[in-house]
Amino acid sequence: MRIGILGGTFDPIHNGHLTLCEKICQNFSLDKIYFIPCNEPPHKTRKDISHPYHRYSMVVLATASHDRFFPSFYEIEKGNKSYTIDTLTYFQKAAGEENEVIFIIGLDSLIEIETWKDYEKILEGWNMIVINRSGYTISEAKRKLPNWIAEKIEIVPGKYSPAEAAFSTALTSSDTEPLKHQPLTSQLAPKKILFARVDPVNISSSIIREKVRKNEEIHGLVPDHVKMYIKKFNLYR
C-alpha cells in the first residue's frame, strides 16, 4: 500500500488541495492520502490562525466524499508545534515497513527544507512528491538546494511506476546475506524527490479568507459543506 501524507494549516482546506491530490493519487498510484491539519505550525507567522478544531472539522467535511482521502487528528491531539519528522515516523510505524509512506510537499516548502527539524532524516527516510507552486520553478529549487538534495529530484511528467525491485540483484549476492529475508519494498531503495508535473490550481487559503472578510462569494473555491461551516461559525471576519 502507498500512503500519502499531506500536512498543512488548512485554514481553510479548499478545492485546490482536493484537485491536486486527486491528480497525485492517479499519477503516483496512491491508495490513501491523509490530510493532517497542524496544531501549531512552526513556520507560519500569522497570529490569527483559526482554532485547530475548526480547521480539522473543515478537513473532515471536505474529504468525506473522497474514497481515498482521510482526515487525521494526529498533530492536533499531539499538541504543541508540529514537526514533519515526528508525523512521518508515527505514520510509518502505524503502516508497517511493508507499506510505503510518501510525504507530499509544495515546491516553496522544499526550497526551505533546510530550516526544518531533522530534514536530513526526512530526505533519507522517505520518498517525497513535490507539488508545483505558482511563482516557483524546479530549476530555481535546484539552484538553491545543496547538490546532495538537488540530485534526488526526478521530474515525473505523467504516471509514475516505482521500481520496487531496484535492489533485487544486490539482495541475492553473498555479501548481503543478512538482508535476504527482509521484505523487498521501496524502503530499501535510495529516496527520491518526485516532482509532479501537474498544473498548480490558482486557489489559496489567503485569497479565500480575504474574500470572506470582504463579504465576497467563495462558491467554487471550497466544497459547499466547508462554505456552510465558515458561514455558520463566522470564520475569517
Image: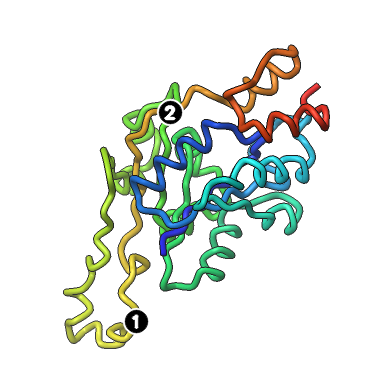
Q: Residue at x 41, y 59 (%)?
A: 124
Amino acid of disc 2? Pro
Give the quarter of the image for residue 44: top right
Instruction: Locate residue 85 relative to residue 217 in the image: left or right.
Output: left
Residue 187 place in picture, x, y as percent: 37, 67
Whether pointer 2 and pointer 1 mark residues with C-beta atoms closer than 8 Å, the reply is: no
Q: Which mark is residue 99?
A: none
Image quarter of the N terminus: bottom left
Q: Residues within 10 Å of mark 1 (few under 14, many from 20)?
A: few
Give the quarter of the image for residue 12: top right
Residue 113 place in picture, x, y as percent: 50, 43
* Element assignment for label 2: loop
Residue 111 place in picture, x, y as percent: 45, 36
Instruction: Locate residue 147 relative to residue 32 in the image: left or right.
Output: left
| Residue located beneath label 2 in the image | 200
Picture layout, residue 105 above or below residue 144: below
Q: Nearer the viewer, residue 170 or 133?
A: 133
Picture layout, residue 122 above or below residue 183: above
Amino acid of disc 1? Gln
Q: Residues within 10 Å of mark 2 (few under 14, many from 20)?
A: some
* Foreground: disc 2 or disc 1: 2
Q: Residue at x 62, y 36 (%)?
A: 13
Give the quarter of the image for residue 206: top right
Image quarter of the C terminus: top right
Q: Nearer the viewer, residue 191 or 26?
A: 26
Instruction: Locate residue 153 relative to residue 3 in the image: left or right.
Output: left
Chain-order first, disc 2 or disc 1: 1
| Residue located beneath label 1 in the image | 182
Q: CA distance from mark 2 to mark 1?
A: 39 Å
Q: Residue at x 34, y 52 (%)?
A: 192
